[in-house]
Amino acid sequence: MAAQIALYVNVNTGTLQSSVTNTFPIASTTLPLFAGDKPLIWVYLVNNGSALSTSGITLKMAISNGNYAATDLASQTTWTAGTDSSSNPYFYANLDLSVSNITSLFSGSIQTVSEVLKISATVSSNPQTVFSGSVNIGVGYA
């Protein structure tokens, strides 16, 4: 079964936090990401304790090795807008970690690789990185 991950991105600080209203920081290295998995990811864009409207915003999530001109190892550019039971707007999509760019990172006895997760939001043709941080991807999926 694919992982289900909720990410609360504080657009002011560029960090992950524990909920829409709780600014307790979450380390991106603790996200349950595994090669071969296609986790369902919810992204809440948070500003001052409120989830921002998804209207007029396009989202991109990418995993890369962090080099400036690097090709994305995995990415998601098609997101669906939703609203949770507390009326907080969010985006959701599956991130395909079964692509060969990810699975080929694991050879021999390698069990975990460290890569960079980047989330960008575009409003009125102006892209802005709202989060960038290290993630660990494990071999196989849970």
Image: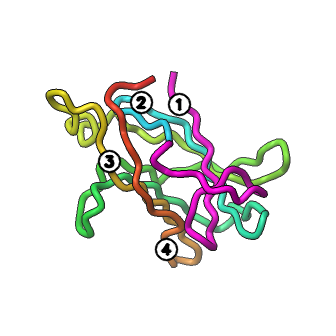
11 in the magenta segment? yes
Q: Residues within 10 Å of mark 2 (few under 14, many from 20)?
A: many
Q: Name the residue under label 2.
A: 37
Residue type marked 4? Pro
Tell me how far mark 2 sits from mark 1, CA to CA.
8 Å
Q: In this view, does 97 lie to the left or right of 92?
A: left
Q: In this view, does 107 lie to the left or right of 92?
A: left
Q: Which of 53 and 86 is in front in this view?
A: 86
Tell me how far mark 3 sits from mark 1, CA to CA.
18 Å
Q: Name the residue under label 3.
A: 114
Residue type marked 3? Ser
Tell me how far mark 1 sits from mark 4, CA to CA.
28 Å
Contact flag, marks 3 and 2 (Cβ < 8 Å): no
Q: Name the residue under label 4.
A: 127
Of tags 3 and 1, the one toward the viewer is: 3
Q: Residues within 10 Å of mark 3 (few under 14, many from 20)?
A: some
Task: Identify the magenta region.
Answer: 1-30
Q: Name the residue under label 1.
A: 3
Residue type marked 1? Ala
Mark 1 or mark 4, which has the lower sequence index? 1
Tell me how far mark 4 sits from mark 3, CA to CA.
25 Å
Of tags 1 and 4, the one toward the viewer is: 1
Tell me how far mark 4 sits from mark 2, CA to CA.
28 Å
Mark 3 or mark 2, which has the lower sequence index? 2
Q: Where is residue 1 in the image (x, y as percent from the top left)?
A: 51, 21
